[in-house]
């Protein structure tokens, strides 16, 4: 039913997660913005940053009441609820509860997107910076093999997973 409360993922503008969160809290929405602790080195000091676990997303507990939905989307930085052709798709309460437990109790949460064999990638850091190729496989902790095809043959390099980006 449209008046039932459920959790939904809300897409936000880039780096507007906190702005949207504050705006929705002022409008009495139930919000969950999972964040992680990331150490950052500055020239003169070390600081801990708290970026969102899922960049550009936060979770909103709401009904699909048209007035409430419109009020939510009028918030600065809010774009749309994530869904398909049939409308927004709710996120299970168990998922939200699991995320809450993770961010409260974990000192380090590993995040990232799993690459699939054949995904186009580019090496962005290190001595192989600029190489464009295809993800071949994972090799050990945080290491990947990038394959470059040329003239019916291939060459492969092993790089840190953090040094590549999916194209």
Image (cartoon, helix red, strand yellow):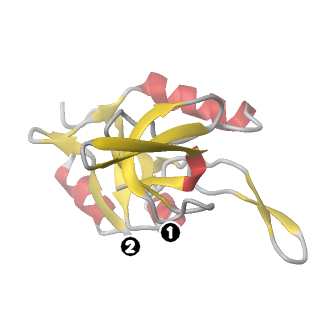
- Residue at x 35%, y 64% (from the top left corner): 78
**Direction top: furthest residue:** 94
Look at the image and tell me in which quarter the N terminus lies.
top left
Question: Which residue is drawn at the image coordinates 53% and 64% (left, top)?
Answer: 129
Q: Earlier in the sequence, mark 1 or mark 2?
A: 1
- Horizontally, residue 165 falls left or right of residue 140, namely left
Mark 1: give few (<14), some (14-19) or many (20+) Cα within 10 Å: some
Label 1 and label 2: CA atoms lie apart by 7 Å
Describe residue 83's horizontal placement relative to residue 60 as left or right. Answer: left
Can residue 22 be seen?
Answer: yes
Seen from the viewer's position, the closer of residues 99 and 159 is 159
Quarter placement of the C terminus: bottom left
Q: Quadrant of residue 93?
A: top left
Dot 2 alpha-carbon crowd within 10 angstroms: few under 14, some 14 to 19, many 20 or more: some
**Residue sticking out furthest to the left:** 85
* Above or below: residue 134 compared with residue 25: above
Residue at 64% x, 31% y: name it.
102
Q: Which residue is mark 1?
A: 19
Task: Determine which residue is flagged by label 2.
Answer: 76
Q: Are marks 1 and 2 in contact (CB under 8 Å)?
A: yes
Image spot of residue 157 (x, y percent):
52, 45
| Residue 132 location, quadrant | bottom left
Q: Give the percent coordinates (x, y) of residue 41.
A: 81, 66
Question: Relative to 100, is 119 above or below?
Answer: below
Where is residue 122 shown, x and y percent of the image? 43, 57
Q: Is residue 34 visible?
A: no
**Can you name the residue that lies furthest to the right here?**
44
């Amino acid at each position: 039913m449209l008046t039932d409360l459920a959790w939904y993922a809300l897409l936000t503008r880039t780096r507007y997660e906190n702005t949207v969160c504050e705006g929705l809290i002022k409008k009495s929405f139930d919000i969950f913005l999972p964040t992680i602790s990331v150490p950052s080195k500055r020239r003169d000091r070390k600081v801990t940053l708290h970026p969102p676990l899922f960049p550009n997303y936060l979770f909103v507990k709401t009904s699909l009441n048209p007035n409430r939905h419109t009020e939510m989307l009028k918030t600065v930085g809010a774009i749309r609820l994530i869904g398909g052709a049939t409308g927004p798709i709710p996120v299970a309460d168990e998922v939200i509860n699991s995320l809450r437990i993770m961010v409260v109790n974990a000192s380090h949460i590993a995040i990232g997107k799993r690459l699939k064999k054949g995904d186009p990638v580019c090496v962005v850091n290190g001595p192989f910076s600029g190489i464009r190729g295809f993800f071949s496989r994972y090799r050990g902790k945080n290491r990947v093999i990038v394959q470059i095809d040329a003239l019916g043959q291939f060459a492969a390099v092993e790089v840190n997973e953090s040094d590549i980006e999916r194209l």
